[in-house]
Image: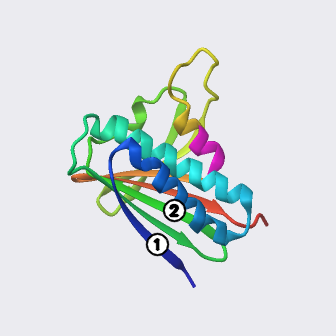
Amino acid sequence: MDTIIKLDIPADAKYLSVLGAAVSAFAELAGDSTITYAVQLAVHEICANIIDHAYGAYDPDNRIDIRLTLNEAQLAAKIVDNGRVFNPQTLLETTWEMQAAENGSSYRLTHIDEPGLEQERGRGIYLVYQLMDSVIYTPQNDRNLWQLTRNLFVE
């Protein structure tokens, strides 16, 4: 059976600590501190990118919706915003597999090179890729959907 929580936060960096606490508390239900940390950091990084890149300037109407789902096999996060569309193909050193989706195309991140030490930015998506088992981005009309999945048990 799935256990689900939904969060709706303002797209403002000052709420990232609240988000982190909520995600950590929920992820702890998986019973593994490594998974708890990985999911919390990955969700934080995606939300920070949404705040910086999808929305840019602060507007109190800008929101981020997060849905966390836990079952015996995985811990998953769906993150939705209404900001600017992200074009995965603009990220250098990444490989995305395009897949047909209900409302267009989705992109599964299949490879990303480790950022160089001289890079000042661009480590967030690399971290997310390293921490999660699946990273999928889907632009849908007037919104963006990120799906992050961490498997709980390795077979």
Farthest residue toward the bottom?
A: 1
Nearer the observer, disc 2 or disc 1? 2
| Numbered disc 2: secondary structure | helix
Position in image of residue 50 (x %, y %): 37, 43
Q: Main secondary structure of the magenta part?
A: helix
Position in image of residue 5 (x %, y %): 46, 72
Label 2 Cα neighbours within 10 Å, binned few <14 / some 14-19 / many ≥20: some
37 versus 118 height, above or below: below
Is residue 95 or residue 141 the one in the foreground? 141
Q: Disc 2 to disc 1, how far (Cα)?
A: 10 Å
| Numbered disc 1: secondary structure | strand
Is residue 150 or residue 43 the one in the foreground? 43
Amino acid type for the residue under numbered disc 2:
Ala
Is residue 122 or residue 24 the one in the foreground? 24
Label 2 or label 1, whichever comes before in sequence order? 1
- Decide if residue 11 is on the left or right side of residue 126: left
Residue at the image point whose x is 64% and y is 52% from the top:
38
Residue 5 has which mark?
1
105 versus 124 height, above or below: below
Q: Which residues are magenta?
A: 127-133
Q: Is residue 97 visible?
A: no
Q: Is residue 155 visible?
A: yes
- Decide if residue 18 is on the left or right side of residue 25: left
- Decide if residue 110 is on the left or right side of residue 85: right
Amino acid type for the residue under numbered disc 1:
Ile
**Quadrant of the snapshot with the C terminus:** bottom right
Is residue 44 or residue 122 the one in the foreground? 44
Q: Is residue 24 within the magenta segment?
A: no
Position in image of residue 52 (x %, y %): 36, 35
Marks 1 and 2: in contact by CB < 8 Å? yes
